[in-house]
Image: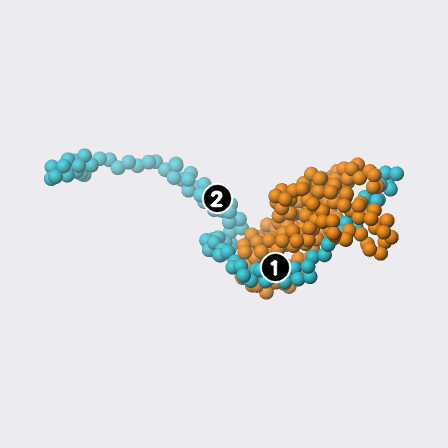
Amino acid sequence: MSDIRDDKLERLLESRQIEPAGPDLAERIVLRAQAIPQKPTMPLLPWLKNLFAELHLPRPAVVLASALILGFVAGYSAPLVVPADTGDGVSVQTFLYADEDIL
Amino acid sequence: MDDHELLALIQEGSRDAFATLARRHTERFYRLAYRYVQQKESAEDIVQEAFLKLWEDPVKWNPERNSKFTTWFYRIVVNLCLDWQKKKRPVELDETVPVADPREPPDEMLMRAQEQKILEEEIAALPERQRTALNLCFDEGLTNQEAAEVMGLKLKALQSLVMRAKTTLKERMKAYL
């Protein structure tokens, strides 16, 4: 009994009716597309792609990410050098006072 | 010229390549859209929208990420159909659609029409993924493996969805089976 119901359902599913599309549907789509301009592609992406292709880098995204990470690591690990106050430079405060005097 | 070559030309702005691709595939994507929306005009609009999106922004197609154009485009059409259904629910079946073979005797014709109508209503009431699995698997020209790829599933998972959909339909259509 169950097999008969299975078969019938299968037959029903296979014979689902579809109203045919208008014969000119494809032509209408083509015609509509003619009135629509294509979006300009972002020039940076193809340029980067070409660059990576020229350099024969197998996984551009991985290479780019690795370079960024390396850059950050190098940046953080380098000692921060603060220029010592030599005394002969004009400090902001002096400059402001001097400015006030003139006024 | 195969689909991938045409798509490369479309990405360079070739209208002729777009026309060839649209003429080649409109019918099959219309059939799928119709199975979802059960209305000729809406199915046509959905297919048109999908193709125009492709024309407008052809770089969305990435041959390195997608194995086959049709698999990728089925996904686009399915998504548009699901969006349409979310906006327009519930699906109203067109009463004027000839849903049975006119050569059949009137009683049989009426009964088959009724069966078809109930079947479509029950399919429309299935959970989204089961409905998609069923629509894709019973679409001619699409293997189960391709249907699974469209849905981003393993073959077994797709088969399980179809099985569940059929079980539900069998239960709900007891009177007609």
Residue type, numbered disc 1: Ile
**Residue sitting at x 68%, y 53%:** B40
x%, y% of residue B6? 60, 61
Give me the residue at 59% from left, 50% from top: B65
Residue B173, quarter of the rendered image? top right
Residue at left offset 62%, top offset 46%: B84
Q: Position of residue A81 (x, y in %)?
A: 30, 36
Q: Residue furthest right?
A: A1
Question: Which chain letter goes with mark 1?
Answer: A
Please, what is the three-letter code of the amino acid marked with disc 2? Ala
Name the quadrant of the C terminus of chain A: top left
Residue named by callout 1: A29
Along the horizontal axis of the image, is A97 left or right of A27? left
Residue B159 visible in this rendered orientation of the protein: no
Q: Are marks 1 and 2 in contact (CB under 8 Å)?
A: no
Which residue is under mark 2?
A: A65
Instruction: Compare residues B147 and B99 and report the one nearer the observer.
Output: B99
| Relative to B129, B113 lies left or right | right
Q: Chain B appears in which tint?
A: orange
What secondary structure is found at the residue carrying circle 1?
A: helix
Secondary structure type for disc 2: helix
Q: Where is residue B166 in the image (x, y as percent from the top left)?
A: 77, 40
In the displayed structure image, the side of residue B150 where residue B113 appears, left or right = right
Of B58 and A92, which appears nearest the observer?
Answer: B58
Q: Return the chain for callout 2.
A: A
For disc 1, the neighbor class at 10 Å (few under 14, some 14 to 19, many from 20) is: many
For chain A, the rendered hue is: cyan
Kindly report the distance in space between the C-alpha atoms of the residues bearing marks 1 and 2: 41 Å
On the rendered structure, is A23 left or right of B62? right
Q: Residue B140 carries which label?
A: none
Which image quarter: residue A80? Answer: top left
